Amino acid sequence: MTEEFETIELVAGKLKSNLDAEDAKKVCTLFAFNSVGKTRITKEFTALNIENEETGEIRPRTLCYSAFLEDLFRWDNENNILNIDTNSWEFKLIKDEGWDGKIADNFKKFLNTKTVPEIDLGTGDTVFKIITGGDVLDNIKISRGEESIFMWSVFYTFLDVAINELARVSEKREIHIFDDLEYIVIDDPVSSIDDHRIISLAVKIEELIKKNPKKEVTDKKRQELEQQKSFEPNYIETRVAEVESEYTNIDLKYLITTHHPLFFNVLFNSIKAKKRYTYILERKDDTFYLKKQGDDAPFAYHLLVKEKIKEAVDGDSLQKYHFNLFRTLLEKTANFLGYTHWSECILDEEIKGEIKRVVDLYSHSRLSDLESSYLTDTEKELFTQAFNAFVEDFKYR
């Protein structure tokens, strides 16, 4: 089933109404190519956050990972320092609660690495070092993928704490900033991350969605008591009930959006159908098409990419994001054929260097759905020539 919408705000409203409905599924996963409007959907949810006009304090109704969260981080290449915006409510919370250690632990857990981040809670400066035995290598330059994992570790720490706090009855919580939290929005947390870690990240998200601290605590307490040798009548049930009375059920709703097929497919297969809505969002001209994905396997991604590019070429509607799609198609073809680099699928030596330069330029933007999407006539001609030659040379059926 496909629904049509005139604005991206109406699409966001549809997704929100699904999650808010009585007896609704708690997760919505959405696939959309870049430049369709995923980041603007996240803004519709973060706009729900409550700000105290006098103090500026944020009481989030939405906890969001998106390009806007990534923009709180600035890399100082000269000094190998990753700076966090100290004016953001996120950094103030890290500082007030002393979560720098939690973030470092999560970073090491996700990467399984000896690289250690150290956050200066005064300046927001984060340096990375490698500790091996008694040797320390200070101020190392981390990769883009490691940088993405660090930013994800910050968000993951927030979300993990929020879940644990919301599982406790209000009077037992250590902090109350998440008391109004309703929505968890995760938009493409996979920038520059390799496939292995993309799968791991998707699995960790699924684990957080399934997490039930109330059941974990009561089950652990019951096991501890059952190991004792003697009890008074109903002793175990009474003690378990005392522990259970400090906990409550969590009612968080998740919206996860991505342009990455592997991430989308892992989520599709790991989260049970009865718990999720799954959509594919497309845009043609000024109309948005929200297609509901059934319970069958997700689409054949490489064929959909080829179809979308061909539509743009035939309709003279090429935009910058089509270079990113073309790169994806080339990478999939190269991997299947055993080539070491996607550029080997461009057989015309006269245009190979230029198409590689332009594809690289237009496939590494964090805010591609907000920036100008126009191409020059020369770029369109280059793209069309390279794509048509690729289709002819590799003959996808």
Image (spheres, grey):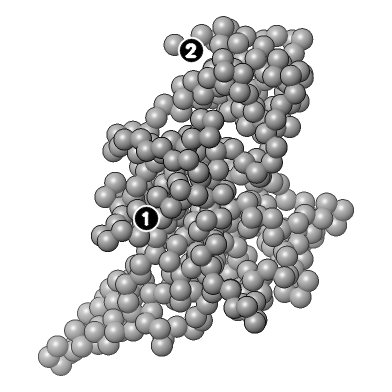
Q: Measured along the vertical axis of the image, is residue 309 above or below residue 242?
A: above
Q: Measured along the vertical axis of the image, is residue 78 above or below residue 181?
A: above
Mark 2 near mark 1, Cβ–Cβ under 8 Å?
Answer: no
Q: Within 10 angstroms of label 1, few (less than 14), some, or many (20 or more) residues?
A: few
Choose mark 2 or mark 1, whichever is in front.
Answer: 1
Q: Residue at x 46, y 76 (%)?
A: 179
Question: In the depicted view, which residue is nearer to us: 205 or 326?
Answer: 326
- In the picture, the disc for residue 396 is 2
Q: Residue at x 77, y 10 (%)?
A: 350
Image location of residue 166, percent across then percent down = 41, 74
Image location of residue 55, percent across then percent down = 65, 81
Q: Residue at x 85, y 57 (%)?
A: 79
Question: In the depicted view, which residue is nearer to us: 96 or 236?
Answer: 96
Q: Residue at x 54, y 72 (%)?
A: 50
On screen, residue 239 versus residue 350, left or right, reads left
The single residue placed furthest to the bottom in the displayed view is 232
The single residue placed furthest to the top in the displayed view is 392
Type of amino acid under label 2: Tyr
Question: In the depicted view, which residue is nearer to us: 77 or 131?
Answer: 77
Name the image quarter holding residue 69. Answer: bottom right
Please tell me whether mark 2 sits on a helix, a strand or a loop: loop
On screen, residue 163 versus residue 100, left or right, reads left
Using the rendered image of the protein, determine whether residue 228 is visible from the camera's viewpoint.
Answer: no
